[in-house]
Amino acid sequence: MLSVGKSSGEDIVGQGSPSDAVLAISAILSAEGRTSTAFSAMLRGMRVEFPAPASYVAYATVPGGVVTAGEPVAAPAQLVEVAELFLAQMRAQGTRVAFFATEGRLLHSQQLDRWLIGEQPVWNPQAWDAHVRGHRSLREQLRRARAKGVSVQMLDASTAIKPTWRAAFDTLIRRWHATRSMPPMRFLVDVDLDAGAAWRRTFVALRGRELVGVLSMAPVPARGGWLLEHLLRDPDAPNGTAELLVDQAMRVMGTEGVTWATLGLAPLHGSIAPWLAHIRRASRPLFNFDGLAAFKRKLRPAAWESIYLAWPRDGSRWRALHDGLRAFADGPLWWFGVRTIARGPASLLHLLEWLLVPWTVLLSLAPTSPWFPSRTVHAAWVLFDVLLVFGLRRLRLQATQRGQPARARAAQLGWWLAAAVSCDAVLTLAQAGLWNWPRRTGWLAAAIIAVACMAPALTAPVLWGAWRRLRTLASGAASFPA
């Protein structure tokens, strides 16, 4: 069994001579790559195994296991055999296996079970022009973008990797990530435009000298189609920019005789298990699964293809799901949660705003003695919290406004709030140590003092995280390379 790490995958876009393993991946991908995950062998952080001739499996590692990027890339008649061989080889090493985002062909394996985890929409680019003519709302979105001066052009591979364009892409990616409540994820959704750049197609949306959108496409060679893998829109891009990018890509593919294209997995879409539907609704403040699916539905795909998580029948489905989530989180889930909180997501800022209201009321009703050194100090703390409530509310409203001036004001307010709460944390700790703790009476008083100290200490990092994201958004769109 041959294997290759990420370092080999990078050679495809490099200037040097590719390794034998990379040449093998390229040949197999060209002949047998028929799924939207086949190209994932090129992504950073992925490893590739060759369990049998003319086949490979791309996967990410997690503690004690591996999570594959879809099903093996192999001839259809050999697919199940290759998957079972890979499973046996991993088990011989004491390693768990989860097949994530498979397209259903592994159903024929007697060793695997599966769960529906979403669907991917597919289009026939040959029918796109007629599709647009019969889709009034899509035509209106395209008109809006063009009316705002947005145009789309396709870059050739040599232009897309030039340093000037790479810098513009990096700026756009940072600004796009700044609009997300969760930190960047890895595995199949890692935004890596360098991976397999020689294979990719890149479309850019420009408004004057501003880069307001990019669409990076990965090939599905054996199907004669394309995965519209990364569709990124600048936060200040006009409405219809994303649709205009898709429209141009579909029209180019249509002129070339391409008959299959997909925007990739819409997670938790379709006839999923009821508990997954509950997760979809509960996670909306952090990740809008419904919104992602709605955008893809708005483009009226010709069909939806089911996507599954598969795992050994004698294994645990919950462990397979946990391994898959760890692959996306690129580490422990609890640490991913901490990183999410530290970004200062809007939903958390809104919660802090409302929690501060009852806290301020209780603070104002508390007796001055023995909790405060004087009435002046008591009144100052109440006034500070009242101002903080209004400051958080204003920040929430300003953060939703578009345009660089509004975003700059929001970033400035975010800095002042974060600095004020940081000072609050220091002063609260000083008062607690010098005044409250020596005068505590019982465990309840100690608990109140601890809560009073922890609240600003935990809130300050959240506000600094929100400020960093607002600062990125206030920096302005990437400039069009000269």
Image (cartoon, rainbow, N blue to C red):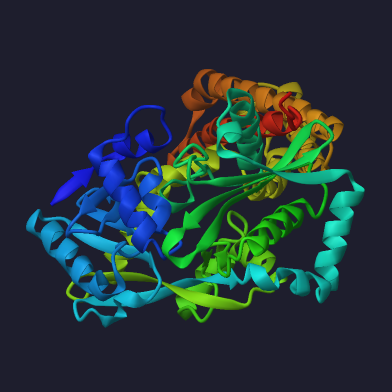
Up-down relation of residue 197 to residue 375 (above or below)? below
Q: Position of residue 369 (x, y in %)?
A: 64, 30
**Residue at x-position 56% and y-position 33%:** 158
Q: Give x and y (percent) for residue 458.
A: 54, 35
Which of 120/3 is in front?
A: 3
Q: Nearer the viewer, residue 146 or 240?
A: 146
Up/down of 457 relative to 101, above or below: above
Instruction: For the C terminus, give its image quadrant.
Output: top right
**Relative image position of residue 171 (x, y in whole percent):** 64, 31
At 31% from the left edge and 58% from the top edge, which residue is drawn?
A: 68
In this view, the residue in front, 13 or 166, is 13
Residue shown at 81%/73% (left/top)?
Answer: 135
In the drawing, does residue 56 fall left or right of residue 233? left
Specify whether 304 is left or right of 387. Answer: left
- Is 346 rendered above or below residue 143? above
Residue 286: percent from left, percent from top: 59, 54
Q: Is residue 207 visible?
A: yes
Q: Residue furthest front?
A: 256
Say which quarter of the image contains residue 45: top left
Q: Single out the residue that lies furthest toward the right.
A: 147
State the residue at coordinates (55%, 67%). Answer: 280
Residue 420 found in image quarter: top right
Across the whole image, how many numbered discs are drawn on residues? 0
- 471 versus 323 height, above or below: above
> Can residue 465 be seen by looking at this rendering?
no
